């Protein structure tokens, strides 16, 4: 008889969700169910991903975050819910819909309470948004609102805060590196320590936290590396041997003014969302304090230097 507790993962077909599922199964202490919409199987790339996860031991259950009945069914016999949803992405703006990140998770929370789920891990995986205000970041607004509802619900919870995803900072969204133009651009004085963690390491830490009784009703704060913007550039140049033109775009106060001005004329929040995330890390407002990396000594997170050496930049 299988007596392992079962984890339900929403957003399991996403980059982070699938990695969390794998990390949990690799740890070997819990079974994994994945919430999927029936329409997911109509996409060949998703079907391949589902097949791969099924081969690893994931059991899938159909459901939709807008369908309360399906969520009640999905939460039957579940010990822990791990949410990794980002929502449905708009092809026009690139933004993720509030009704999934906020209302969808509220529906899932209601089902969790109804079915006696013991712990809920919301879809955070970000900077310490508990230290910023509503309005500072369009996407984090929804995390802030849901976190408050989760805490007030009385359901056990664990928040996962990992700073900025390393992969995102090297992407076009991050707006730091322009490899074609050969530039590295940032706001601020370049001396503020910033937290960076890869998707893989975030998944590993999540798998540990949900099996850790002492992390109940707590926030796990981890970082794969902590570097200033100047150190990030220096590390890139050291590893690759390539020189980039360093461009300081202005002070943190200049960035705040830029965001405020852009908000007034923007066609969508996507026009200033990358800068809002950048502000959160270079201002130090959402810096992770008292990192919990040492709690799980066996995890050796990927440093920025290692990440660059493993990539093709």
Image (spheres, grey):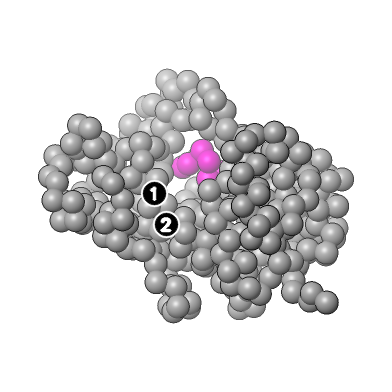
Above or below, comparing residue 80 to residue 4 in the picture: above
Q: Label 2, secondary structure: give it.
A: loop
Residues packed near mark 2 inside 10 Å, few (<14), some (14 to 19) or many (20 plus):
many
Q: What's the mark number on residue 198?
A: 2
Q: Is residue 153 left or right of residue 29?
A: right
Residue 109 part of the magenta-drawn span: no
Residue 255 rendering spot, x and y as whole percentages: 31, 38
The stretch of residues the image draws in magenta is 136-141
- In the image, residue 100 lies at what x, y percent? 67, 40
Q: Position of residue 110 (x, y in %)?
A: 80, 52
Q: In this rendering, does residue 57 appear at all? A: yes
Return the residue nearer the eye: 37 or 210: 37
Q: Are marks 2 and 1 in contact (CB under 8 Å)?
A: yes
Disc 1 packing (10 Å; few <14; some 14–19; many ≥20):
some
Residue 65 lies in quadrant: top right
Q: Can you tell which mark lies on residue 167?
A: 1
Q: Is residue 256 above or below residue 83?
A: above
Residue 29 in the figure: left or right of residue 271? right
Q: Position of residue 23 (x, y in %)?
A: 56, 64
Residue 164 seen in this snapshot: no
């Amino acid at each position: 008889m299988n007596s392992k507790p079962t984890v339900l993962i929403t957003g399991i077909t996403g980059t982070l969700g699938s990695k969390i599922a794998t990390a949990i199964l690799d740890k070997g202490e819990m079974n994994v169910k994945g919430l999927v919409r029936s329409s997911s199987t109509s996409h060949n790339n998703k079907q391949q991903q589902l097949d791969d996860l099924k081969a690893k031991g994931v059991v899938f259950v159909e459901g939709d975050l807008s369908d309360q009945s399906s969520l009640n069914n999905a939460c039957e016999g579940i010990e822990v819910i791990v949410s990794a949803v980002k929502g449905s992405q708009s092809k026009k703006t690139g933004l993720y819909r509030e009704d999934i990140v906020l209302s969808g998770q509220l529906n899932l929370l209601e089902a969790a309470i109804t079915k006696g789920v013991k712990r809920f891990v919301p879809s955070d995986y970000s900077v310490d948004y508990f230290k910023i205000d509503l309005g500072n970041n369009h996407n984090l607004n929804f995390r802030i609102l849901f976190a408050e509802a989760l805490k007030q619900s009385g359901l056990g919870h664990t928040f996962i805060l990992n700073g900025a995803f390393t992969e995102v900072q090297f992407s076009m969204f991050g707006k730091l590196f322009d490899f074609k133009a050969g530039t590295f651009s940032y706001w601020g004085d370049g001396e503020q320590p910033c937290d960076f963690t890869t998707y893989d390491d975030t998944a590993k830490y999540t798998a540990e936290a949900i099996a850790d009784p002492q992390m109940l009703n707590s926030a796990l704060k981890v970082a794969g590396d902590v570097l200033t913007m100047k150190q990030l550039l220096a590390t890139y140049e050291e590893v690759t041997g390539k020189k980039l033109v360093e461009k300081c775009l202005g002070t943190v106060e200049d960035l705040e003014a830029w965001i405020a001005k852009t908000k007034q004329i923007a066609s969508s929040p996507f026009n200033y969302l990358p800068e809002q995330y950048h502000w959160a890390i270079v201002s130090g407002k959402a810096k992770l304090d008292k990192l919990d990396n040492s709690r799980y000594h066996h995890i050796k997170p990927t440093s920025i230097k290692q990440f660059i050496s493993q990539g093709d930049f």
